[in-house]
Amino acid sequence: MVGIALNTLLMIVVAIAIPGVINRTRATLAGRKGLPFVQHLRNARLLLRKGSVYSTTTTALFRIVPAVYLGAAIVAMLFMPVADLYPLISFEGDVICFAYTLALARVAIILAAMDTGSSFEGMGAAREALYGALIEPALMIGFATLAMFCGYTSFADIFAHEQSFNAQITIVMFLIAYLFITIAFVESGRVPVDDPRTHLELTMIHEVMCLDYSGIDMGMIHIAGWLKTACFSMIAANAIAATCCFHWWLAAPLAILLTGLSIGFVESTQARNKLVRNTTFIVTISALAALIFFIGYLLQSDINI
């Protein structure tokens, strides 16, 4: 029980720390003082203390979606082990349940955007649905690659202990880590796919779906986004830690630094893609996932290439 409690606590710490690292990285690279490390927590606290205002055109669906969105993110987080620790929820095939728990969150926020009757929010919902459908093959192929190497379809079993990988398979595991970090960019709505700092409805994706939310509802949506990002970051960190030092005291800081520094660096050095290029970018991620799986299969089968 102590290990499970520590695992859950570490996942919460990772989720809270990643936005702070992103803000500090952007500020450092821009040569400015920037936001305090915990500014996102202060913002969330203010939102959670405020009431919500609802449009007269919305239904009860719009009001319950933030709770569903946050609940799905929390359940997904509870599947995730931190290296050698054990998660609260674990069973055979939970990688599939994890994927479709997050899919439930996406469907909920899309329905809420459509419920407003706003053309802008409907446009964002259409983009979110498209990008979700395009990134799902990469996610499932990434899980299939991990299952092929470890022989299990549960996160707790896949990352149950340090694996004895050779140099070639170690490289593949690093590529898997890169794959999930890239998926995190898409799932969290970050540059180059989306930009959470923009306020132009014609180019927003995730943010435009939340335009009608305020107060505690917006706070729950922000927290759910942190948890989703932490999940993908922890998968990447576990993949790297499994090849060298498979302990929670390495995996947790690694998860924070991998995603926080990567997103902060990309947002400081790159502009977001044109919308017409996003589909190509996401399909390329799925193609990369298929290539990693194919290479891993050849190495696992001792086929010389």
Image (spheres, rainbow, N blue to C red):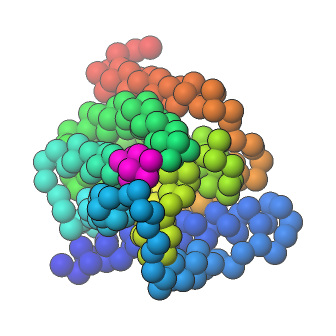
62 displayed left or right of 213:
left
Residue sticking out furthest to the right: 31
Taking depth in this image into account, of 188 and 259 the one nearest to the observer is 188
Question: Is residue 80 at all visible to an observer of this figure?
Answer: no
Q: Compared to 256, does 178 lie above or below?
A: above
Image location of residue 197, percent across then percent down = 67, 57
Please check the rendered image and state whether residue 112 is part of the magenta-colored stretch, yes or no.
yes
Q: Could you tell me which quadrant the C terminus lies in?
A: top left
Residue appearing at x 32%, y 35% in the figure: 140
Residue sticking out furthest to the left: 92
Residue appearing at x 21%, y 68% in the figure: 88
Q: Compared to 154, does 16 lie above or below?
A: below
259 displayed left or right of 269:
left
- The image shows a total of numbered marks equal to 0
Residue sticking out furthest to the bottom: 49
100 displayed left or right of 170:
left
Q: Compared to 168, does 63 lie above or below?
A: below
Classified by dominant secondary structure, the portion drawn in magenta counts as: helix
Residue appearing at x 31%, y 71% in the figure: 7
Please check the rendered image and state whether residue 36 is part of the magenta-colored stretch, yes or no.
no
Image location of residue 131, percent across then percent down = 47, 35
Taking depth in this image into account, of 117 and 46 the one nearest to the observer is 117
Region rendered in magenta: 110-117
Image location of residue 194, percent across then percent down = 61, 45
245 displayed left or right of 300:
right
Residue sticking out furthest to the front: 56
Residue appearing at x 51%, y 78% in the figure: 47
Which quarter of the picture shows residue 142? top left
Q: Could you tell me which quadrant the N terminus lies in?
A: bottom left
Taking depth in this image into account, of 158 and 285 the one nearest to the observer is 285
Question: Is residue 52 at all visible to an observer of this figure?
Answer: yes
